[in-house]
Image (cartoon, rainbow, N blue to C red):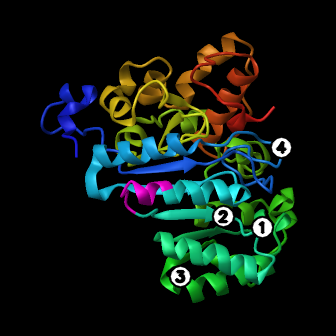
Amino acid sequence: MMELARNVYNRRQDRTSPKLKLWRYAGLLLTYRCSAACRFCSYNCSPHSEGLMPRQTALQAWTSLLNLTGPAAHIHITGGEPFLYFDHLAALLEDAAAKNLPPLNSLETNAFWAQNDTDIREKLLFLKKIGLQELAISFDPFHAEFVPAELVRTLRTLAAEILGPQRVKIRWEKYLDNCPPAAAFLDPNNKPLLQKMLQEDRCRLTGRAAQTIAPLAADKTIPQIQQQSCKNIFLNARGVHIDPFGNVFCGQCSGIILGNIYQNSLEQLWEGFDPPNLPFWQNLFHNGPAGLLPQAAMSGFQPAPLYASKCHLCTDIRRFFFDNGKFSSIIAPKGCYGS
């Protein structure tokens, strides 16, 4: 476990100032490809998305997180949809076990594959044997546009039987037995319903969600967002997400690359992460997304009248930069912004 003083930002702070937290979790995006293209997606995953994280890359990140934070390390595998590549996933978990890495903490799926009891049992028995701590099943009205609720119920039942109910989590289970159609939330006349959902379910309004859902819940002017910096978001982020191409995102900030594990290890990236002194990051650190507006406006960006959150504004500006080839080493990849 590393000392906080190993980080360059932390070394400049006095004893009472907030420090950059150690990264204690890593979400490994095995792929951007997904069986669905949910309007709720905080990336831009779809059946046409690309990328598959090599097993060695995942193992490198897994090992680095242990070096960085010790026994508190938490590894989560997500996507996209990891079960599209179950053989690859299984081989990765077997490699991890052979290297005596701790069991996988969490594995996420939308349950699209839960169509045959024999196949489901076979996969779950493997995951139990390999030591999976939690199976996380994603479900909501927007997932329901692509995955029938009965598949989720089937997977929930068999997973509770094989893994144990305490190791099965459904996000968000309240919709499973009484799921309103997504159209109800997308009706402009039902704006309060969508806003209530977003408040209760803490959707990240990035990626596709910023394009398809956030505008319907927009209720804040830019002056209302201008005072919201991202300083605490960066300092308090307990972990990172790593995409199939090795790109590392701080916390939940998909589409802003702080480094790549093919160039620097996770330990090195944490030690060198200095957001108030890094290009692009420094503006967000001090001024939040509104601090990006002057530069975006110089290139022709025209903000919307209202935004649902500062993340919505940030994604709108970043999409403009992405589409116009600005900050291309930081604002990427296509899996976060689509075509």
Asked if marks 1 and 2 touch (Cβ < 8 Å), the reply is: yes
What residue is pinned by disc 2?
109
What secondary structure is marked by label 1?
loop
Crowding at label 2, few (<14), some or many (≥20) Cα neighbours within 10 Å?
Answer: many
Residue 288, percent across and down?
Answer: 49, 31
Mark 1 residue type:
Phe
Task: Tell me the magenta residue range.
Answer: 95-102
Crowdedness of circle 1 by 10 Å Cα count: few (<14), some, many (20+)? many
Q: Which residue is mark 4?
A: 48
Dot 4: what SS? loop
Percent position (x, y) of residue 334?
72, 32
Q: Which quadrant would residue 17 be assigned to in this image?
A: top left
Relative to 322, say whether 49 is above or below.
below
Among numbered discs 4 and 3, the one appearing first in the sequence: 4
Q: Residue at x 36, y 42 (%)?
A: 64
Instruction: Residue 176: tell me if it is visible.
Output: no
Q: Real-space Cα distance between discs 4 and 1?
A: 16 Å
